Every structure is written in structure tokens, then in C-alpha cells.
Amino acid sequence: YDMGGKVGYGFNFIGYSKDGRIIAIPVGQNWIKMSNDPSGVVVFDLSRTGTIYDKMLFRYHTEGVAIATAVSSKGKYVAVIELPIDVAPPGSPVKIVGEYRLLLFKLNA
């Protein structure tokens, strides 16, 4: 986004099914603590009733950073792109975790 709030480019890192029911959100690492604990993907079924926790289908932890997701048009499959990251604090030796991976999940939703 620019300073006026306009989108700078059109790439969407969050995956949606065609009907908008299934959403897959990539989660990055904690830059403050230099931790990969939160890294991964969280998948929700927005047609479920209840709280956001009730709508969560699953969460998958990745060692590297999940940078993008895609959901098949009918919401049966989720793809996640993972990249390696350096989790070492500034000034420390490099500590690379994760891999270059494409992860595929079949949903039972």
C-alpha cells in the first residue's frame, strides 16, 4: 500500500475458494523474537457457525516461512509455499530453518 492506502500491486498471498467458503492464511515468523513458532498456515471454513475458533479447519506449522497460499476452486485442496528463513538474532551467526517446499493438503470439509 502507498501512503494514500492504494494497493501497490495486485498479488494476493491469501488463498480463497471460488465461493469464498474456504480461506487459507499464511503466517510468518515472529520478527521481534526471531522465532519461527507462529510460521505456517491456518485454514478456515467461513460457512461454519460460531467463533473464529469454530471455523478453523486446521493449522499446520512450517519450519520456514509460509509466504503464500492457494485454495482450489471447489475448496478441496490447499497449497502452501514455504521458504527457508534466518531466525538468528541480529549480530549472531546465521541460523537457517525451513526449506523451499510446496505443501499440498486435501481438505475433508
Image (cartoon, grey):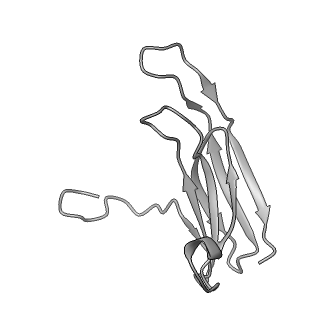
Question: In the rendered view, does 97 fall on the left or right side of 28?
Answer: right
Tell me: 76 left or right of 23: right
How many marks overall?
0
Depth order, front residue of 5/8: 5
Q: Position of residue 18 (x, y in %)?
A: 61, 81
Please state, as top left, top right, bottom left or bottom right, where the N terminus lies in the image. bottom left
Instruction: Pick whichever, 55 or 73, lies toward us.
Output: 55
* Residue 52 falls in image quadrant: bottom right
**What is the quadrant of the C terminus in the image?**
bottom right
Task: State the image coordinates of residue 53 (x, y, percent, origin top left).
Answer: 61, 71
Residue 39, position as x, y percentages in the image: 59, 46
Image: 64 above or below 14: above
**On the image, which quarter does residue 4 sit in?**
bottom left
Q: Give the residue drawn at x 44%, y 37%.
A: 31
Q: Nearer the viewer, residue 96 or 59?
A: 59
Residue name at image x 74 percent, y 52 percent = 103
Q: Position of residue 67 (x, y in %)?
A: 55, 49
Question: Residue at left 42%, top 35%?
Answer: 32
